[in-house]
Amino acid sequence: MRSIRAFWCLPLLLLLSAGDGGKYDYDTDLLTPEFHAGRRNALRALMPDSSVAVFFASPVRNRANDVDYDYHPDPNFYYLTGLREPNAVLLVFKEKIAIDTLFTNEILFVQDRNPGAEAWTGRRLGPAGAKSTLKVDRVLSNTTFTGLKIDYKRFRKVFFYPLPTDVRDSEYDKADLYDLVAHVRHSTKGNKNNEELLIDQYMSILRQVKQPEEMVLLRKAIDISCAAHIEMIKALEPGMGEYETQAILEYEFRRRGAEAVGYPSICGGGENSCILHYTTNRKPLTGNNLIVLDAGAEYHGYTADITRTLPVDGKFSDEEKAIYNIVLEAQEAGIALCRPGNDFRAPHKAAVAVIKKRLLELGVIAKEEDFQLYFFHGTSHYLGLDVHDPGMYGRLEAGNVITVEPGIYIPEGSPCDPKWWNIGIRIEDDILITSGAPENLSGSIPKTIPEIETMMKVESYLNRRPDLPKPTGGHSH
């Protein structure tokens, strides 16, 4: 393949050598340059006088040999710029300052256009395309970054996250992320004005309250995920493998326009339902299994995070019903406290109170503190560009989007009656904090036992497709 590389791509090289790389954005509902500019201005409002913040794009991460993982922008970098390319750096100054011949309060350094590279890995904006598309005040080639005379000691504060250390150095690119990071590391070494903690706080303050433009995309990601989970409820049947449930969910995500999953899909059946972040997804499912399906679509960077627990054969056993209804009651108690002014941990405390009481009543635990054997994670986290989005974890306020996801996990060998073993249940929804009652953004997915059992009797179009192999267990509904 590589021996004919130069021959077949020559016409494409000529095509790529001119024009604006930004014109090939096929999506029309991306965040606007004005949104990103507003977020940079909001950051400046938090920064003290005479300060600069430095943000790097994400590294290109290697999967194996000469194959890289799909590139994912650094969420903070994307939030402030809209750029989805590697090997870039953003400088945000509190005030306009003079640097060499420039007078500006922001500079974005990006990759140059490179027809040869673009023929293999995709079009680049280049400085001109980034300037016209992203509308940052100053956009320069990343090859100029190390030559720009910036005295970081002149600033009262220099803000940056811990500099990435897992960056490959390309011998062919002298302005890759490795070189950009090395330059900043050298230029700020020993600088007493360096500050890492505050920039994390600033970005947490900004990102924990979603802007209206963000909510459009986050709702889209959640709506796509809801539709996929609903189809999964209809399609589930004994004989499937965990990997088939993963395939159905992720196929439905893509079919509805999502670019990716927001995190590795968790599809844990039977004993695997008791493993919080189980992602192997290889077990064949039998009729007496429960399955925990924790999966969310990513749309234009924003991710859903939704979990439902289903009986593979369409019917909960008495023991499964008992544990399931405890988790559902705990979740409803937590959602009820998702109101502005409440402490972030109020939903968790409410969920814990229910789980303690009900497990004692069932005899699963002998004393209240033993609940931690079976519920050992937090109930909520922020949601947005990251599945675990940054936030201050203080008081809830309108514009926060958080999860409410209590669970009970009773693995085999637990110190309780064996009839409870291998029952793992989690129910998770995405909740918007409003000025009044909370809005359950993922509430369209059934989650009561009657709703789930009724929907599981409805045939999915996926079960009717002749091109899909039928599972060996047959349809039991």
Image (cartoon, rainbow, N blue to C red):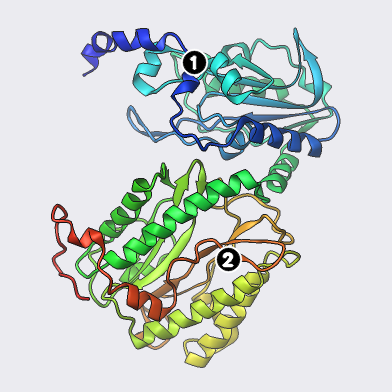
Q: Quadrant of residue 441?
A: bottom right
Label 1 secondary element: loop
Residue at the (37%, 86%) spot, across then down: 319
**Residue 356 drawn at (x, y percent):** 57, 83
Label 2 secondary element: loop
Residue at the (56%, 14%) spot, across then down: 128
Viewer-proximal residue, 33 or 108?
A: 33
Viewer-proximal residue, 29 or 241?
A: 29
**Residue 262 drawn at (x, y percent):** 46, 49
Residue 217: which disc?
A: none
Residue located beneath label 1 in the image: 20
Circle 1 packing at 10 Å, graded few (<14), some (14-19), many (20+), is some
Q: Quadrant of residue 191?
A: top right
| Front of the two marks 1 and 2 | 1
Label pair 1/2, CB-CB below 8 angstroms: no
Residue located beneath label 2 in the image: 378
